Every structure is written in structure tokens, then in C-alpha cells.
Image: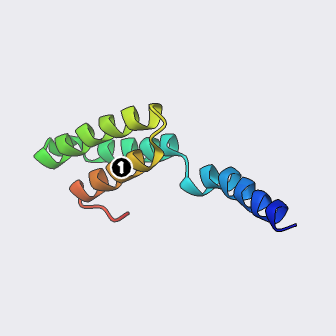
């Protein structure tokens, strides 16, 4: 009985983790809008955020959700935005 409960808990945890992680593509789309709103400033921060955004998209495409989320967060910080 304990083995069945343990197996069920593992299956539930694995199936819920993508939902809890969030969707990196939607986070990147939100970041795109934030970068676009500051694009007229042409500052180093905007260029840095755009670079991190591109890296986040690569990570997301490769299935590295956590890395993509971290890059998006760093890009927002570069723009002076809160996460």
C-alpha cells in the first residue's frame, strides 16, 4: 500500500511541475512588451535586457524552463522593473 501511495505521489508531483513552473514563452512575450516600451531610450540597460531576452528564448526552446525564467528576471532587473 505504501508503494502505491509513494508511486502516486511521484506521478502527481511530476505532472504538476510544468504547471507550477509557468510558461516561459508568455514571460518572454511580456518582457518583449517591456523592452519595447523602453526602446526609445537606447540605453545599455535596454541592450542588456534584449540580449538576456534572446538567451531566455534559446533556453526556453531547449526546454530549460528554470534558466529561461532566471534570464527573464535578470532582464527585468536590468530594465529597473520588479519581478
Q: Is residue 13 left or right of residue 7?
A: left
Residue at (67, 58) in percent of width and height: 13
Residue 59 placement: quadrant: top left
What is the x, y in percent for residue 27? 46, 47
- 43 relative to 35 in the view: left or right: left
> Residue 51, position in %: x, y?
24, 37
Location of residue 83 with respect to 55 vertically, above or below: below
* Left or right of 51, for residue 26: right
Q: Residue at x 38, y 47 (%)?
A: 67
Residue ID at (24%, 54%): 79
Residue 81: x and y, percent? 30, 61
Q: Quadrant of the C terminus?
A: bottom left
Image quarter for residue 44?
Answer: top left
Image coordinates of residue 70 in percent, x first then y, are: 36, 53
| Nearer to the camera, 35 or 66 | 66
- The residue at which mark 1 appears reads as 72
Amino acid at each position: 500500500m505504501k508503494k502505491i501511495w509513494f508511486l502516486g505521489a511521484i506521478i502527481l508531483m511530476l505532472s504538476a511541475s510544468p504547471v507550477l513552473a509557468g510558461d516561459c514563452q508568455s514571460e518572454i512575450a511580456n518582457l518583449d512588451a517591456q523592452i519595447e516600451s523602453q526602446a526609445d531610450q537606447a540605453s545599455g540597460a535596454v541592450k542588456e535586457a534584449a540580449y538576456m531576452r534572446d538567451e531566455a528564448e534559446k533556453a526556453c526552446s531547449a526546454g530549460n524552463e528554470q534558466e529561461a525564467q532566471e534570464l527573464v528576471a535578470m532582464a527585468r532587473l536590468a530594465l529597473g522593473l520588479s519581478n
